[in-house]
Amino acid sequence: MDDAVCLLALDGTVLQCNLSMAHLLAVQPSAVVGKKCYELMHGTGTFFERCPYREMLRTGRRECFELPQGDAWYEVTADPLFSDTGEITGAVHIVRDVTRRKQAEEALQESERRLGLVHDHVADLLCTLDVEQDGRFRIAAANPRFLEATGLTIDQVLGSYIDDVVPQPSLDLALEHFRTAIRENRTVSWDATTIYSTGQRTGHVSVTPVPDAGGRCAHLIVTVHDVTARVQAEQALRDHTAQLASLNALALDLTSMSANEDLGVLLAERLRAVTGAPAVSFSDYDPESRALVIRHVALRPGAAQAAAAPLLGRLVGARSPVSDEVHAQLAGTGSPVLLTLDQAVSGRSVPAAGREVAEQLGTDESLLLTYVVDGELFGTSHIAVEESGPTPSDQLLESFAHVAGVSLRRRRVERELRQMNAYHRSLLEASLDPLVTIGSAGFITDVNEAVVAVTGRKRDELIGSDFADCFVDPGRARAGLEQAFREDAVRDYPLAIRHRDGHVTDVLYNASTYRDAEGRVAGVFAAARDIGALRRAEEEIREVNADLERRVDERTRELTATNRDLQEFMYSLAHDLRSPLRAVDGFSFAVLEDYGDVIAEEGQDDLHRVRAAAQQMGILIDALLSLSQLGGRRIEMRTVDLSAIARSVVDGLRVSEPGRTVDVVIEDGLSAAGDEALITVILESLLGNAWKFTSQRPVAHIEFATAERDGLRVFFVRDDGAGFDPAFADKLFTPFQRLHTAEEFTGAGTGLATVARILERLGGMWWAEGEVGQGATFSFSLTGDNTAEAGDPGGGDPPAGAGA
């Protein structure tokens, strides 16, 4: 055997050893026998403090510990030997090389660390789904980009079904592709646009199935290469740049131990042989399903051959669920458990194999042996016991259980490591971007198929080659790699990959270092993003923008010419209409003067109406001409003192009607950015309206001030005049739409339309609110100064009508 074994007397003297022990000590077997174990193994004059032999003498049971020696690890055990009276007479000392198991455990830990790096740094949306027995898909893992896109937290996502995260109609399409990937056992890709709570996202989706040890699809890796920014840039023509996401992919290529031999068969056959039992079964514990699965039943040659076939057919492959109570019974002690069949039944353990063996082979009872290492259950065996035959000793069974448990643990680690490697390889290949791992010396250690495609070189050619040789400028590539090692990462590093056929692909490289179990930098993960499509889209946008600017210039010239023609037409129209209107007014006046005494009162009234209509028509023509001229005037922006303009307008109104009693309040210090002439027209119209529509009050009140509403600075003119019906407020700013008759209040009906036209040119807004007989409030804002802080001496509540 490979293990180093020696037989010790009570005082530690070596009584006998095998060749493996002599080889381990680098001496001949004759040089070992008769020497003290501590002298041979440790070069000391007595037992050292942690010596398992000394601990065995103290506790009276088997003792074991693991010891590192250079790059190797050894498991050292001491099993007591007893006399017929039960006294310890010596021990069996075993030294076993467990280096490969330690390496496998460390490799599994390293793979888990690398998987964590993938989820933390990959720039695409990534999630892992568990495929449940009912065909539904439960989210087992999700990276930060996935959470960012869905707007959910990790607690909301983990454990949820994909149905609860992905909205329709994208969900039905995704489920269809998931089933195709499982059915055909291949990666399936498609393009999808999904509307999450965070907004609409478009991406290229890939789903890759990951099988379990039995070949069933247990997981799906879903990768979404988000192209939302690029699609928006192409469709909206206003996004000149797209967000480039950094992709740090991790390449994992772990070696695993070969598993050509069926360990379950080996353990069952060996246990039957060493115990001499007529039959032994072996059950493997599956921690995922929490069940014991019978893998093999070993029968004594020639024993009950007629019953062998039906026995095996009934037992092999049978599964028995293990409850929490039974699991605690079998594994809670941290050491092998020996139970009779009756004890197993009363303890609700798994007696199927033992009962069948006992009934079919006529044995008296069955012992249940558990394989437990460090409190973890790996399997069980039922051993048929004949009353007339020998009963296996507890020491033999415990030693066998320990050896078998260590082997089973190593096999489980190997299996998990193989599954993890398959998962990592699927994850690596799920990315559409080139991903590469680079060792500390600058040589490639792994690549995905995207690297093969972009370089035109096979994977075997790439692995072991100089990373820098893949690029047009090897020196720049090497400098970027050195920066990644120096600073632990490099972001958006521009490079150009050269294909074997000479084709060049512009990329942005992102890289991060990864570390070994001791925390030392072991290499670099690098991911490349092709930016050729982005640059082409940017060039197309520039061309479209140039064409758009040309078309805007042409349209501007056309509108300028049209406005000029319109103004000339309006001016000609006004000029041509004034002469006949003056004639109508003049001749009507002459008729009244010359023939007033012979014309009846009704006729005179008609002539007065003709004169009034002609004069009103003149007013309308002048207003129409003034309104048309607003569009052709050039705007000159400057800081304007609105308070001063308002006072000047009110002074003019007082001169025009000195007999009126009007209380006018004008807030001091009101200023804003705008065209002084146009703002003057606004205030003349609004204050003039307030003056006119308060003419029927003995004492009128007019106010010009400012207020703030939701951060918007608002100027308002408020009066207590005739007011208006709020149902017709939308007509106030339309040319020639009057809410009062000319007999009540004179005017052309274009004043507020002029205000609206000016504010539209200045980029401002306007509102109106009033009640019949209760006055009116007209409010407006200016785009050049539209915040409450600019010139607002304290804000306050918005005026009535300001928030319409």
Image (tube, rainbow, N blue to C red):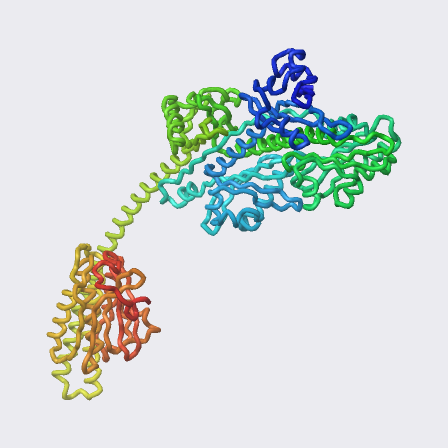
Q: Is residue 358 above or below residue 34?
A: below
Using the image as rendered, state which of residue 232 and residue 267 is in the foreground. Answer: 267
In front: 120, or 735? 120
Provide residue 182's location: percent of width, then percent of height: 63, 38
Q: Which of 384/318 is in front?
A: 384
| Left or right, residue 738 beside residue 275 | left
Q: Is residue 518 left or right of residue 173?
A: left
Whether residue 356 is visible, yes or no, is yes
Viewer-proximal residue, 243 or 767?
A: 243
Q: Quadrant of residue 768?
A: bottom left
Residue at the location (42% across, 22% down)?
Answer: 468
**Taking 482 as reference, is 776 above or below it?**
below
Determine whether, in the image, residue 88 is placed left or right of residue 674: right
The image quadrant of residue 671 is: bottom left
What is the quadrant of the N terminus in the image?
Answer: top right
The residue under the point 21% across, 73% down is 690
Is residue 9 shown above or below 602? Answer: above
Q: How many marks?
A: 0
Tell me: 450 left or right of 409.
left
Q: Is residue 378 visible?
A: no
Q: Toward which corner of the image does residue 797 lie, by quadrant?
A: bottom left
Q: Quadrant of the C terminus?
A: bottom left
Residue 323 position, x and y percent, is: 70, 45
Return the x and y of residue 732 as percentages of the image width and height: 29, 70
Residue 209 pos. (x, y %): 60, 37
